[in-house]
Image (cartoon, rainbow, N blue to C red):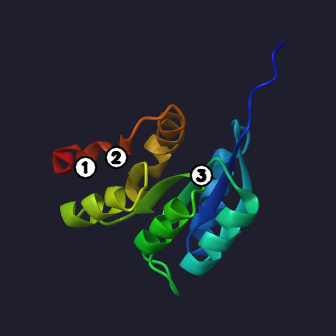
Amino acid sequence: MRKMESFTVLVVDDFAAFRECVCSMLQGTEFQVVGQATDGLEAVQKARDCQPDLILLDIGLPKLHGIEAAQRISVEGSRSKVIVVSQDEDPDVVKAVFSSGACGYLLKSAMGAELLHALTSVLRGETFLSGRLASVAA
C-alpha cells in the first residue's frame, strides 16, 4: 500500500479559535500544519522559516495587512502558495488579493465545504475562488 503524500500548511489568523478550527479540519488529511501565525509580520517570517507548501492567510491582520503579507511572501520568491481566507466579498478586495500573488480566495463561511478543494486545486496549479464569488472574477 502506497503512503499518502503529505503537504505542509501555515495557518495565519489573529483569532485563535479560527486557527484551531482549521487545524482540526486538516487533521487526518494529507495536509500537515507546520506553523501558525497571528499577524502579517509573523506570517512573512514563518513563511520564510517553514517554507510550507501552502499558506492559509487571513487579510484582516494586525501589524501587516494580509494582502501586503502575501505580496512580501511572493516577492521573496517563496515556493509557498498563498490562499487568502476572508469574510470580505468585495470584488476590489478579491482582485487585490490575486494581484498580490495569492493563488486562491476562500470565504470563511465556505471553509467547511471548500477548504480541502481549495488546497488541492492550488497545489495542482489552479487558481481557486470560493463558489459564491465566481461572478466577481470576471
In the image, is 109 to the left or to the right of 76? left
Q: Which of marks 3 and 2 is in front?
A: 3
9 relative position to 127: left or right: right
Q: Do the residues labelled 1 and 2 touch (CB within 8 Å)?
A: yes
Residue labelled with disc 3 = 80
Label 2 element class: loop
Amino acid type at mark 1: Leu
Report the residue at 60% width, 56% height from top.
78
Mark 3 residue type:
Ser
Tell me which residue sits at (21%, 65%) in the image. Answer: 92
Q: Mark 1 points at which residue?
A: 133
Per the image, the residue denoted by label 2 is 130
Q: Which of marks 1 and 3 is in front?
A: 3
Reading the chain from its start, which is encountered first: label 1 or label 3? 3
Quadrant of image for the C terminus = top left
CB atoms of marks 3 and 2 within 8 Å: no
Residues under labels 1 and 2: Cα distance? 5 Å
Report the number of discs: 3
Residue nearer the viewer, 123 or 56: 123
Looking at the rendering, in which quadrant would you find the N terminus? top right
Q: Which amino acid does label 2 sit on?
A: Ser
Q: Position of residue 10 (x, y in %)?
A: 65, 58
Check disc 3 and report its element: helix, strand or loop: loop
Mark 1 crowdedness (10 Å alpha carbons): few <14, some 14-19, many ≥20:
some
Element under label 1? Answer: helix
Image mark for residue 124:
none
